Image (cartoon, helix red, strand yellow):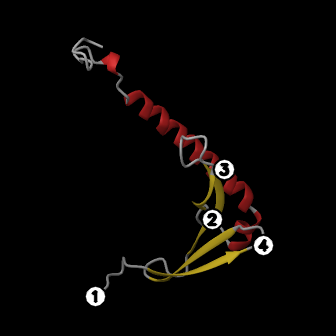
Amino acid sequence: MSSKEDAWAKQEIFRDKDGREVIMFEIVEGPERGKQVFKGKVLITVRVSPDPRVPPQKRPFEFDFPEGKGFTWVRKHFDETAQSAVTQFEKDQKEAQAEAAKKIVTAKDMPGLLGPNGRKI
């Protein structure tokens, strides 16, 4: 009961001694049979808490390689593609934090808000 739009893929993982990881997906059934798609995986250091006493931690970060590239290209261009993906991720995070900061409503922004003593803040 499968349609021709369904695709099955096999996955292979390649690692090097420096901790770089390439995940290859090869489509084995479906309309794009034989196509290969690559993902990269690196460890990045991120701050998990605004508390300065909590140290930054290493977390895995996955990114996609451009479609149509082979394993040799992926292996040779791993570092610059990873750096570009991490830079874009950091930029997106900063933009999201700026948007969230705009949405924060302070007590001064709410004119009818009363404090604990019943007076306006």
Please name which of the two marks, 3 or 4, marks the residue nearer to the observer. Answer: 4
- Cα–Cα span, label 3 and label 1: 41 Å
Helix, strand or loop at label 2? It is strand
Helix, strand or loop at label 1? It is loop
Please name which of the two marks, 1 or 4, marks the residue nearer to the observer. Answer: 4
Q: Look at the image and tell me in which quarter the C terminus lies.
A: top left
Q: Which residue is mark 2?
A: 41
Near-viewer residue (3 or 99): 99
Q: Which residue is mark 4?
A: 17
Q: Which residue is mark 3?
A: 84
Q: Is residue 58 above or below residue 14?
A: above
Q: Amino acid at mark 1?
A: Met
Q: Amino acid at mark 3?
A: Ser
CB under 8 Å between discs 2 and 1 = no
Q: Earlier in the sequence, mark 3 or mark 4?
A: 4
Q: Which residue is mark 1?
A: 1
- 95 on left or right of 69: left
Q: Earlier in the sequence, mark 2 or mark 3?
A: 2
- Cα–Cα span, label 3 and label 4: 22 Å
- Cα–Cα span, label 2 and label 3: 13 Å
Which x, y percent locates residue 43? 65, 60
Which x, y percent locates residue 57? 62, 54
Q: Earlier in the sequence, mark 1 or mark 4?
A: 1
Q: Amino acid at mark 2?
A: Lys
Q: Earlier in the sequence, mark 2 or mark 1?
A: 1
Q: Amino acid at mark 4?
A: Lys
Please name which of the two marks, 3 or 1, marks the residue nearer to the observer. Answer: 3
- 71 on left or right of 106: right
Near-viewer residue (121 or 10): 121
CB under 8 Å between discs 4 and 2 = no
Q: Earlier in the sequence, mark 3 or mark 1?
A: 1
